[in-house]
Image (cartoon, rainbow, N blue to C red):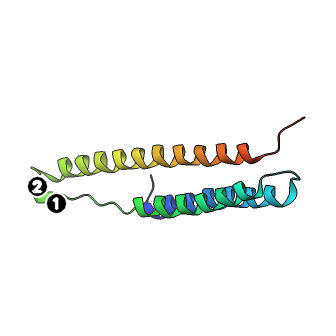
Amino acid sequence: MANKRSLKKQIRYICGDIAGETLLAKTLIPGIDKAAMTDVIVKTAELQTTALCRTNIAFDKTPKDFENKAKYRAARRKYYRQAFDKLSETFNNQVLAVVKEMNAAMPKKK
């Protein structure tokens, strides 16, 4: 993770792309379940909001809590890595769930 700013941009881009594709499919594909696609757009907006809120994390210790600055930096790096990994896993699972709902709303082939 480079920084929170780039992480938030990536989340916005991914959710925006999902919403755009959903809207495009809803408009152009005949026989698609429009109500389900509207629900997908709403869930994508909720996903974006919750993911952006989860990026606001902070390391709750200070350098005085450690023997030296190297141990503080190592602990802080480990904390942020674990937080990022958890956020990434949760976000990816939610994106997959939204994509499955999109696919379920597509018309069935005959």
Q: Position of residue 2 (x, y in %)?
A: 45, 55
* Residue 98, position as x, y percentages in the image: 62, 49
Q: Residue under circle 2?
A: 65
Within-10-Å neighbours for mark 1: few <14, some 14–19, many 20+: few
Q: Which mark is residue 62?
A: 1
Q: Nearer the viewer, residue 58 or 91?
A: 91
Amino acid type, label 2? Asp
Disc 1 marks a residue whose amino acid type is Thr
Q: Is residue 2 left or right of residue 12?
A: left
Asked if labels 2 and 1 touch by Cβ distance under 8 angstroms, the answer is yes
Horizontal arrangement in the rendering, residue 78 relative to residue 68 (left or right):
right
Q: Residue at x 87, y 37 (%)?
A: 109
Identify the element where label 2 is drawn.
Answer: helix
Q: How far is the residue under mark 1 from the one under mark 2?
A: 6 Å
**Would residue 35 appear left or right of 2 to someone viewing this image?**
right
Q: What residue sits 43% from the left and 49% below the top?
A: 87
SS at mark 1?
Answer: loop
